[in-house]
């Protein structure tokens, strides 16, 4: 039988009442994820539990590698059953790891299986899960509906045609809103060897000749308008190391011309291009009332041998302690001065920045704007119990926790939605503890309303600008 009982993570009767009376039934707004729109639009079916559960999940891959599993049985050409067996063998060692909790919640919520995951139960789990996956109820759309999802925001490049979002919008029998998110990381990566190829794709998609920096911005703006027509209301920027150096229009034209000619760029020129292009994009976001997400503090693909073998986004990233906040302040202040600062969510992979980000956000309240700049949820390597509690503490210490936008899966998996339950239980326990200690009102309707806002309504209002 599963160790997950009704009171899982809920240490008091108050926490339990908050969760079951207010949080449990709330729908899900997953405002930041990496689901593949084509798989949603085509209502993808899955062949087996390995494809559905382990495919694309770098959290699980990292545990398997640390547990000594050969790469053949992680991302390699090993057979699917062996991969699943290896995962079941490794998981019992994940004491204190959120993946241990998530995996059992996923097994319980989607498969109605209460057995604990181990090598002893692996054969039974393989058979029972695959039997259920073979049923019509385990398509991509059915899994989302079962999880009580109302909206998701995918991550999309400016050159994407968004045809699958259009297809989904035309499906009258699918009630979930699937909206694009404008993620122009490649457009800012002027130092990337593939930048010229990207410029050519952007030119073809926008229909604008990109022979100047001014036209480059026109093309990016053209795509913003197209995304807006497809109900996009969010952008997302992965800026691993935040640096701010302004540039004049003539300097930008010179930098862009050098890039087109494949001439070497200095580190300063790269930063100038990114600074000014991000400021331009932010001004367009503000005009359209979008929300801008900024993710900082990551060191990507630190294992160069495995990068050469597997490529990017395979589970070899970690936080960095390189300074970034001073430059982030300069960037936000510049946007504020120019009255072009959009609503902004700040994410850091470095957990030591929780308090700093929360206080920084409070410096840019806007003019009668509600939670204009705020920290996003505990992100990536921090979305465990301690990380979430620390983030809630930092947010509450510096800002108004009742306006927090809540949880996002940041996931490629259709089984990841129990992470919202995980967060909601931790949230209710956090607030319940404050009430039990006499540090917050014992009027549960007040606390419960705040919890419902954090779980769903704040994200909906921020996204739709209600």
Image (cartoon, rainbow, N blue to C red):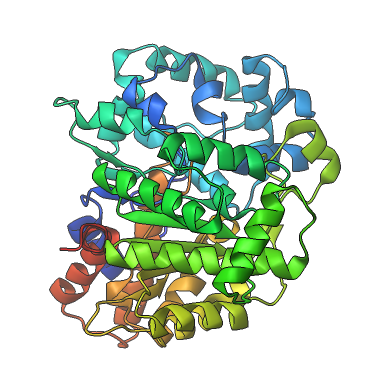
Quadrant of residue 337 within the rendered picture: bottom left
Q: Residue at image x 26%, y 58%?
A: 463
Camera-side residue: 326 or 269?
269
Q: How many marks?
A: 0
Q: Is residue 123 above or below residue 459?
A: above
Camera-side residue: 316 or 402?
316
Q: In this view, does 4 lie above or below 458?
A: above
Q: Residue at image x 59%, y 23%?
A: 122
Is 28 left, or right, of 181 in this rendering?
left
Specify whether residue 111 is in view.
Answer: no
Quadrant of residue 33 within the rendered picture: top left
Q: Residue furthest right?
A: 305
Specify whether residue 61 is in view.
Answer: yes
Question: Residue 293, image x and y in percent?
Answer: 44, 62
Q: Which image quarter is the C terminus in?
A: bottom left
Quadrant of residue 156 within the rendered picture: top left
Q: In this view, does 311 lie above or below 99?
A: above
Question: Residue 56, image x and y in percent?
Answer: 57, 33
Q: In this view, does 75 lie above or below 278?
A: above
Q: Residue at image x 53%, y 76%?
A: 354
Is 209 left, or right, of 302 in this rendering?
left
Q: Which image quarter is the N terminus in?
A: top left
Question: Residue 94, image x and y in percent?
Answer: 64, 47
Question: Residue 412, image x and y in percent?
Answer: 49, 38
């Amino acid at each position: 039988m599963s160790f997950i009982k009704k009171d899982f993570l809920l240490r008091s009767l108050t926490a339990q009442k908050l969760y079951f009376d207010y949080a449990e039934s709330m729908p899900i707004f997953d405002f930041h994820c990496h689901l593949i729109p084509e798989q949603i639009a085509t209502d993808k079916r899955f062949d087996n539990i390995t494809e559905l559960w382990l495919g694309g999940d770098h959290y699980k891959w990292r545990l398997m590698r640390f547990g000594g599993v050969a790469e053949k049985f992680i991302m390699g050409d090993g057979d699917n059953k062996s991969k699943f067996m290896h995962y079941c063998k490794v998981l019992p060692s994940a004491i204190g790891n959120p993946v241990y909790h998530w995996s059992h919640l996923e097994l319980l919520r989607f498969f109605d299986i209460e057995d604990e995951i181990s090598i002893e139960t692996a054969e039974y789990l393989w058979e029972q899960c695959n039997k259920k996956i073979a049923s019509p109820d385990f398509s991509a759309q059915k899994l989302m509906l079962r999880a009580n999802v109302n909206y998701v925001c995918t991550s999309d490049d400016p050159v994407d045609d968004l045809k699958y979002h259009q297809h989904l919008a035309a499906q009258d029998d699918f009630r979930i809103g699937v909206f694009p998110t404008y993620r122009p990381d490649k457009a800012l990566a002027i130092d990337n060897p593939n930048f010229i190829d990207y410029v050519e794709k952007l030119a073809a998609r926008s229909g604008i000749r990109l022979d100047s920096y001014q036209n480059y911005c026109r093309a990016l703006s053209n795509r913003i308008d197209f995304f807006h027509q497809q109900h996009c209301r969010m952008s997302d920027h992965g800026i691993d190391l935040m640096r701010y150096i302004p540039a004049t229009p003539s300097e930008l034209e010179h930098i862009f011309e050098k890039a087109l000619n494949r001439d070497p760029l200095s580190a300063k020129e790269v930063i100038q291009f990114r600074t000014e292009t991000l400021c331009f994009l932010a001004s367009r976001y503000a005009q359209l009332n979008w929300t801008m997400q900024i993710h900082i503090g990551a060191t990507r693909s630190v294992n160069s041998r495995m990068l050469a073998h597997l490529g990017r986004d395979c589970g070899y990233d970690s936080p960095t302690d390189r300074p970034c906040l001073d430059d982030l302040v300069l960037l936000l202040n510049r946007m504020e001065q120019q009255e072009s600062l959009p609503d902004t969510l700040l994410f850091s992979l470095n957990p030591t920045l929780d308090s700093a980000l929360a206080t920084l956000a409070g410096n840019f309240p806007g003019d009668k704007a509600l939670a204009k700049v705020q920290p996003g949820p505990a992100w990536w390597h921090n979305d465990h119990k301690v990380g979430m509690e620390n983030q809630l503490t930092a947010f509450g210490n510096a800002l108004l926790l009742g306006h927090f936008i809540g949880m996002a899966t940041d996931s490629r998996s259709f089984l990841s939605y129990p992470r919202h339950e995980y967060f909601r239980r931790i949230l209710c326990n956090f607030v319940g503890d404050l009430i039990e200690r006499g540090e917050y009102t014992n009027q549960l309707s007040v606390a419960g309303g705040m919890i419902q806002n954090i779980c769903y309504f704040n994200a909906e209002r921020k996204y739709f600008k209600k």
